[in-house]
Image (tube, helix red, strand yellow):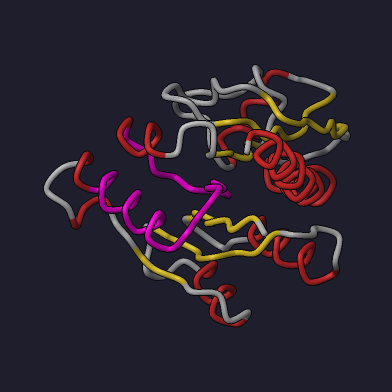
Amino acid sequence: MLSIAVLVSGGGTNLQAIIDAIESGKLKDVSIGCVISNRKDAYALTRAKDHKIPGECIRPRDFGSIEEYGDHLANYLQSNGIDLVVLAGFLVVLPKNFIQAFAGRIINIHPSLIPSFCGDGFYGLKVHEAALARGVKVTGATVHYVDEGTDTGPIIIQKAVCVEPGDTPEILQKRVMEQAEWVILPEAIDLVRKELEDRR
């Protein structure tokens, strides 16, 4: 059984997609060991509580340095037996010491087809605003491994979504979530689970 930690900053719709995939049996041999947020008011923590999943708010600002935060977070997850860290709308840049502690075992969902509209400053609605401003006809979502760069790790899976006439950033964001993010994130977790099993 693969134990995952889901790190979130907001509403947790991607967390819900993972929960639904596990509860429906689409995602097998995976359990959510804990949900971590950097915001106490993140609705994702309520989703975790509703499904009897341990939830915790761990904020970088509560530590003397970003390195202390990274050490604490890594120790917390390791002590809870976490195998894989899933970033699902987590708006904190993870420090190098944390990334090294979970090297090859952190994945992230990004709302574009990387390498388009990714890197520093591209998150949330900003991604969809940029896609519409550029006039692209196809966008989508990507799940990738996390390395020490921003959205630079190896790609695991991508799914394309068409841009429609009259799309606003909000409408496009919703379509990318529904048609791509919520579909490929559970699929990527399953692919990584198999890969981690093969490594053992």
x and y percentages locating residue 66 in the rendered image: 22, 41
Quick one: which residue is furthest to the front in this view?
A: 200
Quadrant of the snapshot with the N terminus: bottom right
Residue found at x 78% / y 30%? 158
Residue found at x 57% / y 42%? 124
112 or 5: nearer the viewer: 5
Residue found at x 19% / y 57%? 62
Quadrant of the snapshot with the C terminus: top right
The verdict on residue 93 being magenta is yes
The verdict on residue 39 being magenta is no
Quick one: which residue is furthest to the left in this view?
A: 64
**Relative to residue 80, is residue 122 drawn left or right?**
right
Quadrant of res 108: top right
x and y percentages locating residue 180 in the rendered image: 80, 42
3 or 50: nearer the viewer: 3
**Relative to residue 99, is residue 17 drawn left or right?**
right
x and y percentages locating residue 144 in the rendered image: 63, 31
Q: How many marks?
A: 0
Q: Magenta residues, as a range? A: 69-95
**Relative to residue 29, is residue 69 drawn left or right?**
left
Residue found at x 48% / y 26%? 147
**Relative to residue 123, is residue 129 drawn left or right?**
right
x and y percentages locating residue 41 in the rendered image: 41, 70
100 or 6: nearer the viewer: 100
